[in-house]
Amino acid sequence: MKIKATLFTLALLLVGNNLFSQIITFRHVFGGTGDDFGQDIEQTSDGGYIITGATGSFGYGQSDVYLLKIDSLGIYEWSRSYGGSNIDWGYDVEITSDGGYVIAGYTNSFGAGGYDFYLIRTDSIGDTLWTKTYGGWDWEHCYSMDITSDNGYVMVGSTYSYGAGEKDVWIVKTDEFGDTLWTKTFGGILDDEAKSIKETFDGDLIVCGGSYTFSDGDSDGLLIRLDSVGNTLWFANYGGPKYAEFNEAVQLDDTSGFALFGTNATGATGGTDMYAIKIDNIGTITWVKLLGNSLDDWGMGIDNLPNNRLVFIGSNSIDGGSIESHVFYANGIQINSIAMAGTKKDEGRAIKLCDDAGFVILGNTKSFNFGYSDIIVAKTNQILETDTNLYIEILDTNTIQYPIPYTSTTEIKKEERSILLFPNPVSNNQFTIKANYIINDVQVFDLLGQPIPISIQKSETAFTILPSSIISGIYFVEIRTNTKIISKKVIFE
């Protein structure tokens, strides 16, 4: 690990004899020389923090699931990456009863289709205990997960393999070992997807996202309440004539209803706004808040606070983009807000209440970074103040990589080994793929995931990729069989 910036202080102790004087604040940046992204953060029992997201700096594929542990002062402790040769992404992390972690996201490296739900269970230092994938022949993306009262897991996102429309909400419930108990789809003939799922205090499930099927114009924000076995109790759509979507919902501590946060383009500011609403237990709106300026603003995360308060985080387009947080009373009155801005695009992803009544903020930054994007973590006091001048920029060089640890998809690797791709490196833009089973299609992608035009000569047992104008570099060849999509790295000389 290298410390890139000069460190004048590890933390800022707020000055003055007031309630907030002993709350440590910091603002630190983590990453490598590639692109790294933070998606979710939780406070651990030792006062530190666990973060998940995706890394393009470490691992074996175009992106891998990333797990980063920092201490209570925001100092790096350890990191892990998980995945295969393609795109793998972590979206949600939770702390298990034994002090380990469970990460939910999606994978393009393993599973049955193009993308599948991806669940990773680790011990307290990030070593893998097991992994599972869930999905059909097409694309499934998981964006949220919760640990349920039976110690199992419930995941939500979108599916193209199942359901009534092009894209539908997909919910997967498992036991504590990740084995599927039931799955449910929700949606109509148009695109519908979910971004958040949480278990309520009485054991129901609350799901939010966006729906084109159930809307008053463009996409509307979608809220679904289900019982513990996935039966829909009721659902409602919110928004206006333009685009709206929810990214997270929480049940209020007094169980009087729910608060939802996302994005809405219906406001009078000229762009998209952060969109906060409060509803009662049968979905009736109590209040609506649109937060933003004349440019685009996006609502991402929400957390429930004591004393009937709520905290929201998102991004605005001022100065290229900044991280913006707001605290409200549950009656809709705003208490305070902050914006942390660099010179380039920075975005907020998650905000959580900490044990000292301050907040930890997770986001992504292009203003203070080693690669194109890095992870930014800010610790604030109770009134959202943080050190806005001093950063620690930490270049991670210690990530332990887990390409296929204790996975339920090891049979995929047997199939992958039975495919021959030669020559590699490719010297004249022509190579051949052979397998002992049917290959339906072959595609070539660059490192950004963009398809490269190719010419193919197909025989009974082989695909030959004929010469084309591919420039020198590293590419990924995607090989589609009847049941799998396998990716291999190829070097063109």
Image: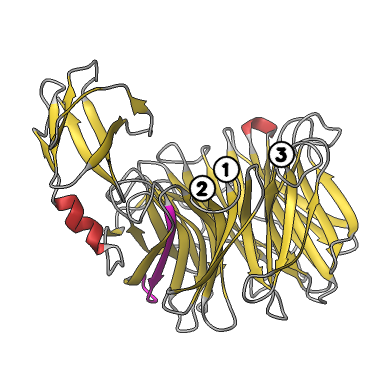
Query: Residue 286's x, y, as percent?
Result: 91, 59
Q: Amino acid at mark 1?
A: Glu
> Comparing marks 3 and 1, which lies closer to the viewer?
1
- Going by the image, does 202 lie left or right of 57? right
Q: Amino acid at mark 3?
A: Asp
Q: Which residues are magenta?
A: 116-126
Label 3 neighbour load within 10 Å: few <14, some 14-19, many 20+: many
Q: Mark 3 — residue?
A: 297
Q: Mark 1 — residue?
A: 166
Q: Secondary structure at mark 3?
A: strand
Tell which of 102 and 387 is nearer to you: 102
Residue pictured at 34% horizontal, 43% vertical: 62
User: Contact (CB < 8 A) between labels 2 and 1?
Assistant: yes
Query: Residue 118's x, y, as percent?
Result: 42, 60
Residue pictured at 10% horizontal, 23% vertical: 427
For the residues labelled 3 and 2, the Cα–Cα distance comes to 29 Å
> Comparing marks 3 and 2, which lies closer to the viewer?
2
Tell which of 327 and 254 is nearer to you: 254
Q: Mark 2 — residue?
A: 160
Q: Which quadrant holds residue 233?
A: bottom right
Q: Amino acid at mark 2?
A: Tyr
Q: Is residue 210 magenta?
A: no
Residue 353 visible? The answer is no
Residue pictured at 14% horizontal, 44% vertical: 435
Point out the tag, 2 or 1, that comes first from the N-terminus: 2
For the residues labelled 2 and 1, the Cα–Cα distance comes to 6 Å
Label 2 neighbour load within 10 Å: few <14, some 14-19, many 20+: many
User: Contact (CB < 8 A) between labels 3 and 1?
Assistant: no
